[in-house]
Amino acid sequence: MVSVLQDKTVRAICVQNVEETEGLAIALSRHSSSAELCNIQLGNFTIWRRNCTNHINLDYNKPTTGVCVVMERVSVKDSGVYSCTLDKTIPPPVRTLSQSHICLTVSALPVVEVSLASSSPVDKETTLTCSAWDFYPGDIQLSWSKDSHLFTNSTRNDSLFHNSNGSYSYRSNLVVSKDDWNEFAQFSCQVNHSTLKMPVVKNLTLTQSGKGKCVLCIMTFLGGTIYSLRSPVSNRKYGCKIKNMTENKWNILIFWLQYLVLKTHTDHHWVFSCGNPD
């Protein structure tokens, strides 16, 4: 039994104790097919004829008197049972001296992605999608959590797909209502598979973008109003300095409204001072 991850190189013993090489032929075939994948003929302890296909080869090692199967960049499709047949071709007739089998299992790691599949208006629902691509074998576990707690209070639609290359893919759609999330709620998709040393976790943070747009509109309106009243404002990067501020009550009101909006929705500390012009 040989187990390996996809895209790796496999070396497995095909024939052992080949002490006499004259007139020997070794063939490798798949157990479910009579077609030969690789065939070599030995003479004088060397390979003097070779006929192999694709990424498969047979390698004769004189010091160990053994023949190995070498398969490069294996894929899930290469999983299966292989037969190694040792024949004596000289003198005729051909005689089969031995036959052995290699059971190969190629596993593939899942590629995990999480995304926002669809979003209705802010007062309705949102669909999150977690996908695990191109894994093998097909058994896999997937779960959703919200803010590090297992999340089950939602509609979930899961599907398992069998890919043309022999691997599997899995998709989970999670429908989240507005009542189940708030500003900066973090949803996580956790995937566990036999090829993983530890589960893969992908996070997605939902934000109510409508609230952000509203704040931007208020700040833009107030900024334009203050500009129209010609109240000098400087040092906007980390604070502002207002000089010669009039006693106009509306101007003062708008000024402090802008201050409150910025203080509530940013992390900056705003410093105000009044004095004579430079």
Image: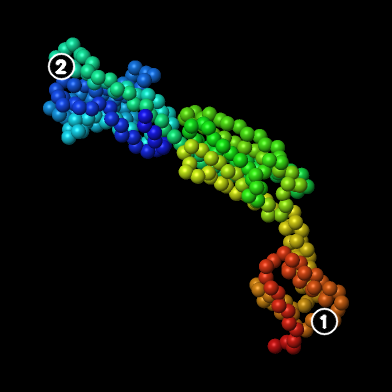
Name the residue: 41% across, 37% down.
Answer: 5
Tell me where residue 254 sits by quadrant: bottom right
Say which residue label 2 marks: 90
Tell me where residue 96 sits by quadrant: top left
Amino acid, disc 2: Ile
Disc 2 element = loop
In this rendered view, identify the residue nearer to me: 54 or 276. 54
Category of crowding for the residue at label 1, using alpha-carbon neighbours closer than 10 angstroms: few (below 14), some (14–19), many (at least 20): few
Name the residue: 39% across, 36% down.
Answer: 4
In which quadrant will I find the N terminus? top left
Which mark is on residue 246? 1
Cα separation between marks 1 and 2: 112 Å
Could you tell me if residue 228 is visible in this image?
no
Residue 25's place in the image compared with 129, above or below, is above
Disc 1 element = loop
Do tag 1 and tag 2 residues touch (Cβ < 8 Å)? no
Rendered image coloring scheme: rainbow
Instruction: Please tell me which of labels 1 and 2 falls first in the chain.
Output: 2
In which quadrant will I find the C terminus? bottom right
Task: Return the x and y of residue 225 as percentages of the image width and height.
Answer: 80, 70
In the displayed structure, does residue 200 sit left or right of residue 70?
A: right
Could you tell me if residue 145 is visible in this image?
yes
In this rendered view, identify the residue nearer to me: 196 or 78. 196
Name the residue: 14% across, 24% down.
Answer: 20
